[in-house]
Image (cartoon, rainbow, N blue to C red):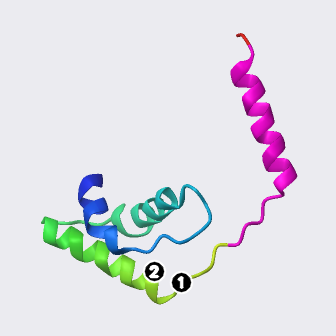
């Protein structure tokens, strides 16, 4: 199913800073449109995805980074130390 979605949504402009924005987009698509939907054909699925994309693009919201850079870097350092330490 993911292959279909990626092929359909290639025209979406992903121009935000987060490195995992495609993951965020597909999570929103899944929870807001596809999770409880009933699709009897691939055409129905495509139409639902296109409606979601059109709605998202018609009311774009800029991404605002709110995390403190010092806390992010500290978390990265802790993660690196945990991965490098012998268990």
Q: Position of residue 7 (x, y in %)?
A: 26, 63
23 left or right of 2 in image: right
Q: Is residue 20 above or below residue 17?
A: above
Magenta-tinted stretch: 64-85
Quadrant in the rendering for residue 13: bottom left
- Residue 1 screen position, x and y as percent: 25, 53
Please name the residue shown 78% across and 40% down the image.
75
In the rendered image of this protein, does residue 77 appear above or below residue 2?
Answer: above
Q: Secondary structure at mark 2?
A: helix
Mark 2 Cα-neighbour bin, 10 Å: few <14, some 14–19, many ≥20: some
Is residue 40 among what the camera can see? no
38 to the left or right of 27 = left
Residue lying farthest to the bottom in this orientation: 58
**Lateral position of residue 59 relative to residue 36, left or right:** right
Q: Are marks 2 and 1 in contact (CB under 8 Å)?
A: yes
| Residue occupying the point 31% across, 60% down | 6
Q: Main secondary structure of the magenta part?
A: helix
Q: Residue 60: which disc? A: 1
Residue assigned mark 2: 56
Quarter of the C terminus within the rendering: top right
Q: Residue at x 78, y 48 (%)?
A: 72
Q: Secondary structure at mark 1?
A: loop
* Residue drawn at 20 percent across, 66 percent down: 39
Q: Is residue 14 magenta?
A: no
Mark 1 crowd level (few <14, some 14–19, many ≥20, 10 Å Cα): few
Give the percent coordinates (x, y) of residue 86: 72, 10
Q: CA distance from mark 2 to mark 1?
A: 6 Å
Q: Quadrant of residue 44?
A: bottom left
Q: Nearer the viewer, residue 32 or 43?
A: 43
Queried whether the magenta region covers residue 77, the answer comes back as yes
The total of numbered circles placed on residues is 2
């Amino acid at each position: 199913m993911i292959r279909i979605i990626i092929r359909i949504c290639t025209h979406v402009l992903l121009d935000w800073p987060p490195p995992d924005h495609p993951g965020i987009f597909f999570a929103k698509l899944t929870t807001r449109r596809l999770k409880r939907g009933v699709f009897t054909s691939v055409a129905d699925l495509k139409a639902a995805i296109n409606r979601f994309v059109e709605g998202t693009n018609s009311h774009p919201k800029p991404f605002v980074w709110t995390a403190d850079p010092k806390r992010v870097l500290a978390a990265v350092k802790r993660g690196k130390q945990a991965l490098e330490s012998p268990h």
